[in-house]
Amino acid sequence: MPDETLPETPPETLPETTENDVTEVTEPESTVEALESVERSDSAAAKAAEHVLATVEPTVGVSKPDTILVADGVQRRFGGMTAVDVDHLEVQRGVITALIGPNGAGKTTFFNLLTGFDKPNQGSWSFEGKSLAGISAAKVARNGMVRTFQLTKALSRLTVLQNMQLAAMDNPGENLFASLVKPLWSGTEKRNAEKALEILSRFKLDAKKDDFAGSLSGGQRKLLEMARALMTDPTMIMLDEPMAGVNPALVQSLLGHIQALRDDGMTVLFVEHDMHAVRHISDWVVVMAEGRIVAEGPPAAVMQDQAVVDAYLGAHHDTDLGDDSLLDPAVLARLEAEEEKR
Ligand SMILES: Nc1ncnc2c1ncn2[C@@H]1O[C@H](COP(=O)(O)OP(=O)(O)OP(=O)(O)O)[C@@H](O)[C@H]1O
């Protein structure tokens, strides 16, 4: 790797930036508190999503009016264990779909399969009517389906702007680093730099363009991951746990940005553990448990679905599904009785 592509000072020696450098004036103390002040979006796109999905039966494998992604019979086994076993899933275009499920449900594995980062034992899936089974991650991205990646150690040592430029270089995810051998400042790169600055400014990260990505806070890194994905003008964006490690001070801003992706016409599929975030921004929720899809539907309905309550609360009584009504005495009494029988 040429030295000039790396900043002189290693990021470890830089002071950590704080969340407050970027946005919020108010400082909620918890994610829940932060979310209390987040209204569900009433944008035209949000209303359109709600309107069209109101016509869809909340049943597993249901057909959607305008499907952008379809998966059929997708199975992934590790030794004798079946991590993913999805019969049929359709993702509606132009809406925010959340993929949720307890730990080990198979969400990440399914995500990896759809985006070409893993290979299934069997199954097929198509994006915009085009089969993607057996297609490399780079080609999946070129077809318009882009996923975010956690900032790797290598990318942390590049500046925010360099990260953005690399993202435009046809190199999804981990392969980005290999592209450092290419010259960075060609004509195309200049255009990419302009585009990068435009996107960074939308994410209020433009002032940080020359900072090491590794010096960003957790929330700022999530914003950078999203900003990087936008460099390839995706039709569909896949977000892997966008709220993980995010300080409450950036929660509202991050959720606003995810909703803005939908409002700009993109389709969003995201894996998330924070049920409050899921309730607040998703138009449709797909629930996985033990590799299978056990429920799908609008967020409020899905989180009261018995299969979902069982999948989460059956294993973890203290799991917060973002809706206190789930913790009603009848549910708790049943779970306690089940626990006593074990
Ligand atoms: N490379 C692998 N080798 C063996 N087993 C694996 C591998 N990857 C995943 N698994 C197993 O497959 C199952 C599904 O894992 P996966 O990470 O997809 O679940 P998840 O729903 O994303 O969980 P979490 O929410 O905890 O990230 C788990 O039992 C996991 O241990």
Image (cartoon, grey):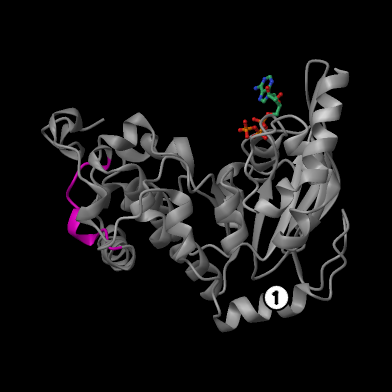
Indicate whether residue 206 is drawn in magenta.
yes
Q: Is residue 54 visible to us here?
A: yes
Residue 2 appears at what percent x and percent y? Answer: 21, 33
Determine the residue positioned at 39% across, 57% down: 227
Residue 39 appears at what percent x and percent y? Answer: 51, 71
Q: Nearer the viewer, residue 241 or 231?
A: 241
Q: Is residue 76 visible to us here?
A: no
Which quadrant of the rendered structure holds the C terminus?
A: top right
Determine the residue positioned at 74% across, 29% down: 315
Q: Quadrant of ligand 1?
A: top right
Badge 1 crowding class, 10 Å Cα cut-off, few under 14, some 14 to 19, many 20 or more, is some
Q: Main secondary structure of the magenta part?
A: loop
Determine the residue positioned at 33% across, 37% down: 155
Residue 75 appears at what percent x and percent y? Answer: 82, 34
Q: Which residues are magenta?
A: 204-213
Residue on which disc 1 sits: 50
Q: Nearer the viewer, residue 212 or 280?
A: 280
Residue 289 appears at what percent x and percent y? Answer: 78, 37
From this view, report whether residue 134 is shown above or below residue 49.
above
Indicate whether residue 159 is drawn in magenta.
no
User: Given the current orientation, which residue lies at the most extreme left position?
Assistant: 8
Determine the residue positioned at 26% across, 58% down: 205
Q: Amino acid at mark 1?
A: Glu
Q: How many marks?
A: 1
